[in-house]
Image (tube, rainbow, N blue to C red):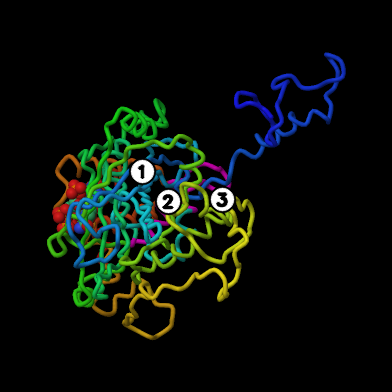
Amino acid sequence: MANKKTITTNSGSPVNHYQDSQSVGDRGPLLLQDYFLHEKLAQFNRERIPERIVHAKGSGAYGKFTVTHDISKYSRAKLFSEIGKETKLFVRFSTVGGEKGSADTERDPRGFAVKFYTEDGNWDLVGNNTPVFFIKDPKKFPDFIHTQKRDPKTHCKNPTMVWDYWSLNPESLHQVLILMSDRGTPVGYRYMNGYGSHTFSLVNKDNERFYVKFHYKTMQGHKTFTDAQAEEMKGKDPDYAQRDLVEAIEKGDFPRYALKIQIMDLEQAKTFKWNPFDLTKVWPHSEFPLIDVGEIELNEIPENYFQDVEQAAFAPANLVDGIGFSPDKMLQGRILAYPDAHRYRIGANYDSLPVNKCPYATNNYHRDGAMRFDGNGGSSPNYYPNSFDGLQEDENYKGQPYELESNVVGYFDRNDPAGNRNEDDHFTQPGILFDQVMNDQEKQHAISNIVGAMSGISGPKKDDIINRQLCHWFRASTTLGMGIAKGLGVDVDKIMKDLKH
Ligand code: NDP
C-alpha cells in the first residue's frame, strides 16, 4: 500500500512517472498502456461543471448567526429561539450577469445567499443586495436575462437590447435606478446590504402568521465605487471582491451584517397601498419599521473553492418550521427553478455534498442517482410505510392551513390598474428614492451613470427606446428625467408632449 506521501492513481496505485509518458524509445510514440496519462488528461477534461446561468462569478465564506433580540412572538423557528443562540452558516456573494471569469466590479446587482444550518434543516435565504427586482412574474425571467447576456450575433454585451427590454417593462424602473446609483458598484461584498427581497411569512408557536421581509445591514458601513473607479478596477484587479473578502477574513477582520425584519400582519396586507407580494416594491420603513433580530459574522474562507463555493447550491425552497412562503409570484417560481438548476448543474445528489448537506439527520426514502456517495441508506428499507425502520411523519410539523384571497384560476395581468393595489405604479417608489433619499452627489452620479449607460443605445430604434425610457424616468421624478434628457441631448419639450398622451 502506498504511504501518504506517494503520488497515486485515482484507484490508489503508486505512480512512478508523473511527468514522463511511456514511449517506444526516447523519441518514439506513446503507449496506450500508460493508463495514468489517460487518467490525468481525462480528469482535466472534466474539471469544469456547467457554470450558473446567472450568478456565475461568486465568493463564499462560512460564519455564524447569533440571535441578539427575541422575535418569538413572530416566529417559532428554532434558530431564533434564544438570545445568544448561534447557528453555523455559509454565504455566497456574486455578480449576476457576467460569466465565471468576469470582473467583480461590473455594474450589476450582487447576490447575497445565506444557508443557515439549523437543527430543523437548512434554511436558505437566497437574496440580493437590492430590496427589489426587475420583474414581478417568473415567466419573464429568461427573456430578461437574455438581455443582460450576450448579443446572439456579435456575442458582445448589447445596451440596445438591455434598454429596449427595460423601456418595454417599466416595472423594472425601481431596480434599474438602484442599479444605476453608486450602490450598483459596491466596494466588494463587505460594504453592502443584503435583502431577502421577497415577502416571506413567519409563524409563531400559536400558529399566528405574519408577512416578513428580511434585511442584512452591513456593519462595515456602505462603500461604493464611482463608475470611473469601478471601470478602472475591472482592468486592475478583476477579482477585487474575492481578494478583499479572503484578505479581510484571513487577517481576522470578520465582516458582519445585522439581520433585521419588517413585519406586516394579515390585515395590513389587505389594505397596504401596494401589493405586498410585488417584488418591485419595498415596504416603507415609516409604516413597517425595522426590527432587530441578530448578527451574521463571516469568519472562515473554505479550504477549497471548487468544493464549497462552486458546488454550493441554495434554494428558496429550503425553509424551516416557523418560516413560510408567501404568494409572491417570483418566490413561487424560484421554489421550482432553483433545485432544478442544481440537478442540472451538479447532479441529482447535490444536497449530499458537504457544503449543502444538513449537518443534522436527514432520513427519507430517496435513493440512488448519479454519484451517490453518502451510504445511500445502507441496508435500511427504501419504501414507506414499512415494519422495520421506525421512521415516522412528525405531527409537530404539520403546519397550519391558511386561506387565500381568491379561488379563481386564470392568467391575471400583473400590471392591471383595477383594484386598490396600484399594480401599474412603477414610478412612486423610485421617485421617492431619487427625490427624497439620495443626496445631491448621489443624484448627480445616478444621472451620469444612466446617461453613460443609455448612450450605448444604437440602431434604427434608438430614438424610440430612448424616448420611451425617458418617459419612465420623468414619471418617477422630473428632476431625474430632466437631468438624463439634458445629458443625452434630447429635446425635452417633445418628451413632455409624448407624456401627455
Ligand atoms: P427610508 O428613508 O426609511 O430609508 C431609505 C432606504 O434606502 C435605506 O434602507 C437605505 O439603506 C436605502 N438606500 C439609500 N440609498 C440607496 C440606493 N442608492 N439604492 C438603494 N437603497 C438605498 O426609506 P423608505 O422605507 O421610506 O423608502 C424610501 C425609498 O428608499 C424606497 O422607495 C426605496 O427606493 C428605498 N429603499 C427602501 C427600503 C425599504 O425596505 N423600505 C430598502 C432599501 C431602499 P441604508 O439604511 O442601508 O443606508
Q: Could you say which disc has been placed on residue 291 in the image? A: none
The residue at which mark 3 appears reads as 346
Nearer the observer, disc 1 or disc 3? 3
Work out whether mark 2 precedes mark 3 in sequence or the reverse, and give the earlier one: 2
Nearer the observer, disc 2 or disc 3? 3
Closer-to-camera residue (346/444): 346
Closer-to-camera residue (317/294): 294
Mark 3 crowdedness (10 Å alpha carbons): few <14, some 14-19, many ≥20: many
Quadrant in the rendering for residue 430: bottom left
Against 448, residue 288 (above or below) is below
The part of the chain drawn in magenta is: 146-171
Q: Could you say which disc has been placed on residue 453 in the image? A: 1
- Residue at 68% from the left image edge and 35% from the top image edge: 10
Relative image position of residue 335 (x, y in whole percent): 44, 64
Q: Amino acid at mark 3?
A: Ile
Against 391, residue 259 (above or below) is above
37 sits left or right of 324 in the view: right
Q: What secondary structure is found at the residue carrying circle 1?
A: helix
